[in-house]
Amino acid sequence: MYNTNKIKSQVPYFFFGKLTCILVIMAAIFLMVLFILPEKTASAGNTTGCTYTITSVKIEEGDSLWSIAKEHYTDEFSSLTNYIAEIKRMNGLSSDMLYADSYILVPQYILN
């Protein structure tokens, strides 16, 4: 006959061993992805002598994303269209609608 008490007492340790093994493998994969994969960097043209800043702009009556972007756009950004897309992304905007007396964040480069 089998000793069922011995088998029952080993089941939790057996399960705990598999769970621990799975957690260790998942942690190792996470660390590999975090530290081994190359970083992705974005450049916005020649920024030598410039400082990247983020400015808060108050929306006035009649302002649009286009007019604000034209006012703050510099050659360091790839295009005005991409610059507007960046402003929308920074502010979590899904449309071009702006409301007077509110504020948006605008990235810009300032010469040193």
Image (tube, grey):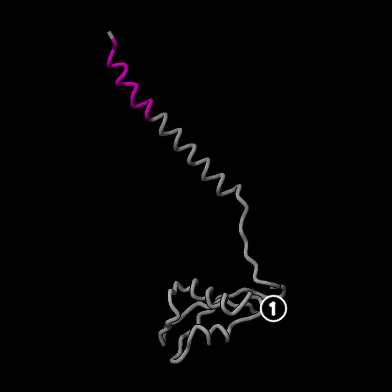
Amino acid on which disc 1 is placed? Asn
Q: Main secondary structure of the magenta part?
A: helix
Residue at 43%, 74% (x, y): give it.
94
> Can you say whether 24 is above or below 106 in the image?
above
Quadrant of the image occupied by residue 7? top left
Magenta stretch containing residue 49, yes or no?
no
Residue 106 placement (x, y as % from top left): 53, 78
Residue position for label 1: 112
Quadrant of the image occupied by residue 109? bottom right
Q: Secondary structure at mark 1?
A: loop
Q: Is residue 112 left or right of residue 72?
A: right
Q: Is residue 104 left or right of residue 79?
A: left
Quadrant of the image occupied by residue 31? top right
Residue 23 placement (x, y as % from top left): 45, 38
Which image quadrant: the N terminus? top left
Residue at 44%, 72% (x, y): give it.
92
> Can you say whether 98 is above or below 9 in the image?
below
Residue at 55%, 49% (x, y): give it.
34
Q: Is residue 86 left or right of residue 2?
A: right
Residue 24 placement (x, y as % from top left): 48, 37
| Residue density around tag 1, few if under 14, some if 14–19, many if 20 or more, within 10 Å | few
Which image quadrant: the C terminus? bottom right
Identify the magenta region.
Answer: 2-15
